[in-house]
């Protein structure tokens, strides 16, 4: 059974991340709801993500997806790369997603993040390319730095999708408040994208206590502490950002 999502056509063609971020997060929510996990689990597991996304239907367009997770990857110049999303004119209706198994061997968080990033390319950029009449598409994540890119363009969109898929705003806010209260962090009121009517973490809390909360959240969601810090800032959950 394919993973099925739908979104406005403009979301895949918009170059401005801030304008399309709510729609990107909505797509991430559609995907997240179709990836199996235990009722008490908030982290997505890489095997479950891969199995749920072996076939996708995007706005009525179907694609079979081949995943490769274990081998080393390199580009045309022979340089190691972290991840890859590829379609080939000779294989219509088929897409290839890969993660460098050597580079991520001891970093399950990086493997998960890379898979989510490449899935973002598949769900947004591949349908857009096909609609433009292009028969091939290829996106390469050269290194972990590619997963930090913000601003505008396809890489930023794939990163926003990755972030919202693995660490959605409301579950993050809920867990943040639980850890913040156990650490005695000061809270305040401010605009945010998390749990409605709930406070956020105030500026000026002790660095050690805040670091402990970041580490706990990283463990909750199966990502890195840096990943959590970016999401807290993107969702406005810490006063003044991280």
Image: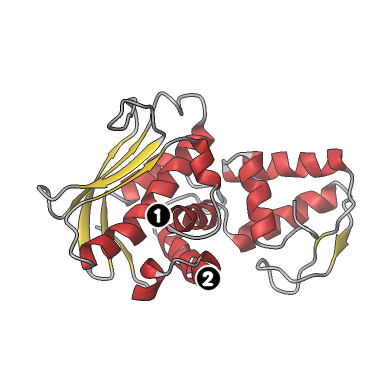
**Lateral position of residue 46 relative to residue 69, left or right:** right
Label drawn at residue 54: none
Residue 159 visible in this rendered orientation of the protein: yes
Residue at coordinates 49% horizontally, 67% vertically from top-left? Answer: 16
Residue 194 against residue 156 in the figure, above or below:
below
**Lateral position of residue 64 relative to residue 224, left or right:** left
Label drawn at residue 22: 2
Residue 242 pos. (x, y %): 75, 51
Identify the residue position indicated by label 1 in the image.
120
Q: Name the outermost residue toward the front.
A: 77
Dot 2 surroundings within 10 Å: few (below 14), some, or many (20 or more)?
Answer: some
Residue at coordinates 67% horizontally, 66% vertically from top-left? Answer: 194
- What is the basis of the colouring in this image? secondary structure
Question: For the residue labelled by badge 2, is the local secondary structure a helix, a strand or a loop?
Answer: helix
Q: Name the outermost residue toward the left.
A: 90
Using the rendered view, name the quadrant where residue 122 is placed.
bottom left
Residue 57 visible in this rendered orientation of the protein: no
Residue at coordinates 51% horizontally, 37% vertically from top-left? Answer: 144
Residue 85 against residue 125 in the figure, above or below:
above
Residue 173 pos. (x, y %): 69, 59
Dot 1 surroundings within 10 Å: few (below 14), some, or many (20 or more)?
Answer: many
């Amino acid at each position: 059974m394919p993973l099925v999502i739908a979104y406005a056509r403009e979301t895949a063609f918009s170059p401005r991340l801030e304008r399309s971020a709510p729609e990107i997060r909505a797509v991430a929510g559609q995907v997240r709801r179709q990836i199996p996990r235990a009722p008490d689990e908030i982290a997505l597991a890489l095997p479950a993500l891969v199995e749920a996304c072996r076939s996708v239907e995007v706005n009525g367009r179907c694609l079979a997806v081949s995943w490769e997770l274990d081998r080393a990857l390199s580009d045309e110049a022979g340089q190691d790369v972290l991840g890859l999303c590829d379609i080939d004119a000779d294989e219509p209706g088929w897409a290839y997603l890969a993660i460098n198994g050597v580079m991520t061997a001891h970093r399950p968080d990086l493997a998960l993040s890379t898979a989510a990033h490449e899935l973002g390319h598949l769900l947004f950029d591949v349908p857009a390319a096909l609609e433009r009449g292009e028969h091939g598409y290829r996106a390469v994540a050269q290194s972990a730095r590619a997963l930090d890119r913000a601003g505008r363009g396809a890489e930023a969109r794939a990163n926003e999708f990755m972030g919202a898929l693995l660490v959605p705003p409301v579950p993050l806010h809920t867990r943040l408040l639980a850890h913040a209260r156990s650490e005695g962090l000061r809270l305040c009121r401010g605009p945010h994208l998390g749990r409605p009517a709930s406070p956020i973490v105030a500026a000026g809390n002790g660095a050690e206590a805040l670091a402990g909360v970041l580490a706990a959240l990283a463990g909750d969601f199966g990502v890195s502490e840096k990943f959590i810090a970016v999401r807290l800032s993107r969702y406005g959950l810490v006063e003044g950002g991280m």
